[in-house]
Image (spheres, rainbow, N blue to C red):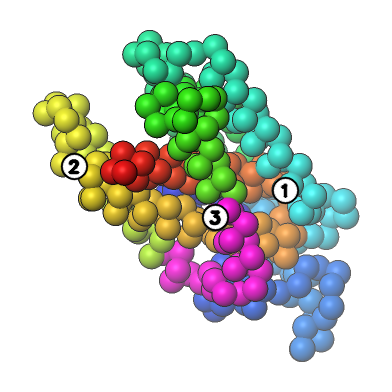
Amino acid sequence: MRSSNPVFSRRGFSHDGGTAGYGAQPQAGGAATATGGNPYAQAGGSNPYAANPYAPEGQQQGEWAPYAAAAGTRMTMDDVVSRTGMTLGLVVLAAVASWITLDGASSSGLGVGVAAGLIGFVLAMVQSFKRKPVPALILAYAVFEGVFLGAISEYFNTYFGSGGAMTGVVMQAVIGTMAVFAGVLVAYKQRWIRVTGRFQRYVIGAAIGFILLMAVNSLVALFAGGDGMGLRSGGLGIAFGVLGVILGACFLALDFKQVEDGIAYGAPREEAWLAAFGLTMTLVWLYTELLRLFSLLQGDD
């Protein structure tokens, strides 16, 4: 299982293209397969964790397979929940502190927020290229991303609020993010969303195109002024905002698949940090897209 969002690769999709819970197989120590053997008692096969990327140099991979054989070292849902709670908690705390201490409506306060967002992006890229999760990097990312969110939230609240803190588009975006998370979770658990390898490729391809378009729009706006190609304002901006929210919802489904596969295949406990990292990035993506979308909708009233 690799961290993701919006363009990081994942592992854990079954080789037959099945969906989580359908194509996935039980952990080592679970019920035997129809052939009477446990596919996780040997290296290879369809278990992405049978080949250990953390094994010392020269160590035969088969001697380490599977991860699930090591009692007490497997990733559990509690691990994912606790790590995700830590990262999201830091995001919220940093956002509140940024809201209180920075004047997001001013150029200096907004500049600090944007700088923090860029640092958070760099930290996310550094983590994405590492083979093992680095909790310090992930937690630092959460802090800087929180500072960024606090600054831009105050900015949007100043121009689209209802006269008080945490009102208007900010509260709408917070509620909207929680609603999308709950809705996708229910749809995923009920198998209304079938996460396959093809689904993954389409979503990641669409996200790459979306990010490239937004980057070009930002560059045009930087050098030509205004809103660049107009992809973030007016009717076109609303359309791209809706697309951004849909992509965020799709990435939530991929994150849930990532967690489910990690637990089913007996991933090492430390990979719970990657699951928390991916979920945090997706929720940040959703919140920022909803914040922008609601501000456009309110501006058209």
First reached walking from the N terminus: tag 2 or tag 1: 1
Residue occupying the point 83% across, 60% down? 69
Viewer-nearest residue: 259 or 49: 259
* Residue 296 higher or lower than 112, as above or below: below
* Residue 69 higher or lower than 7, as above or below: below
* Residue 31 higher or lower than 114, as above or below: below
Q: How far from the left and from the top, in percent, is residue 96?
A: 60, 23
Viewer-nearest residue: 206 or 1: 206
Under circle 1, the secondary element is helix
Mark in the foreground, 2 or 1: 2
Q: Residues within 10 Å of mark 2 (few under 14, many from 20)?
A: some
Task: Report the Cα–Cα distance between label 2 and label 1.
Answer: 39 Å
- Magenta stretch: includes residue 180: yes
**Quadrant of the image for the N terminus?**
bottom right
Residue occupying the point 64% across, 65% down? 186
Q: Amino acid at mark 2?
A: Gly
First reached walking from the N terminus: tag 3 or tag 1: 1
Q: Which residue in the protein does label 1 denote? A: 80
Q: Which residue in the protein does label 3 denote? A: 180
Viewer-nearest residue: 242 or 41: 242
Q: How far from the left and from the top, in percent, is residue 259?
A: 66, 57
The picture quadrant where one finds residue 115 is top left
In this orientation, does residue 252 appear? Answer: yes
- Per the picture, the main secondary structure of the magenta-coloured stretch is helix
In the rendered structure, which segment of residues is drawn in magenta? Answer: 179-201
Q: Which residue in the protein does label 2 denote? A: 230
In this orientation, does residue 14 appear? Answer: no
Q: Amino acid at mark 1?
A: Val
Residue occupying the point 52% across, 32% down? 167
Task: Report the Cα–Cα distance between label 2 and label 3.
Answer: 26 Å
- Magenta stretch: includes residue 147: no
